[in-house]
Image: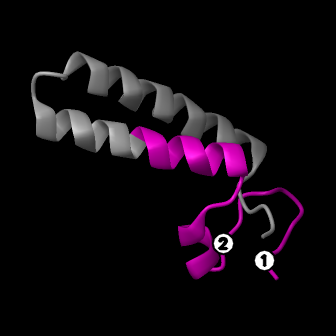
Amino acid sequence: MHHNVGKLDGWVRGSLAVAFLIVALVLIEQVVFSLLAALAALVLGATAIMRHCPLYEIFRHTTRPGRSHP
């Protein structure tokens, strides 16, 4: 698996993951919204850490500078 998430994209995804995690904790009484926010945080956090986005792979896109998609 190659990296297709650039540095800035990774930071944005990580920041959004933290924000969604906070939303999930704030909305703990509203179970559906809390779970959706936690799921979004998990997906964004995982793609930021792994530096690989499956949707980018499907659409043959990359945000890494100087790299074209193979």
In the picture of the structure, the residue carrying the numbered disc 1 is 69
Give the secondary structure at mark 2.
loop
Is residue 57 located in the magenta-colored stretch of the structure? Answer: yes
Tag 1 near tag 2, CB within 8 Å: yes
The color scheme shown is one colour
Q: Residue at x 66, y 35 (%)?
A: 11
Residue type pointed to by label 2: His
Nearest the viewer among 70 and 17 is: 17
In the picture of the structure, the residue carrying the numbered disc 2 is 61
User: Label 2 crowding class (10 Å Cα cut-off): few <14, some 14-19, many 20+?
Assistant: some
Residue 49 got which mark?
none
Labels 1 and 2: the sequence-earlier one: 2
State which quadrant residue 32 falls in: top left
Quarter that holds the N terminus: bottom right
- Whole-percent x, y for residue 56 in the image: 60, 69
Q: Which residues are magenta?
A: 41-70
Nearest the viewer among 47 and 9 is: 47
State which quadrant residue 70 falls in: bottom right
- Whole-percent x, y for residue 14 in the image: 58, 34
Is residue 65 located in the magenta-colored stretch of the structure? Answer: yes
Q: Is residue 22 left or right of residue 66?
A: left
Give the secondary structure at mark 1.
loop
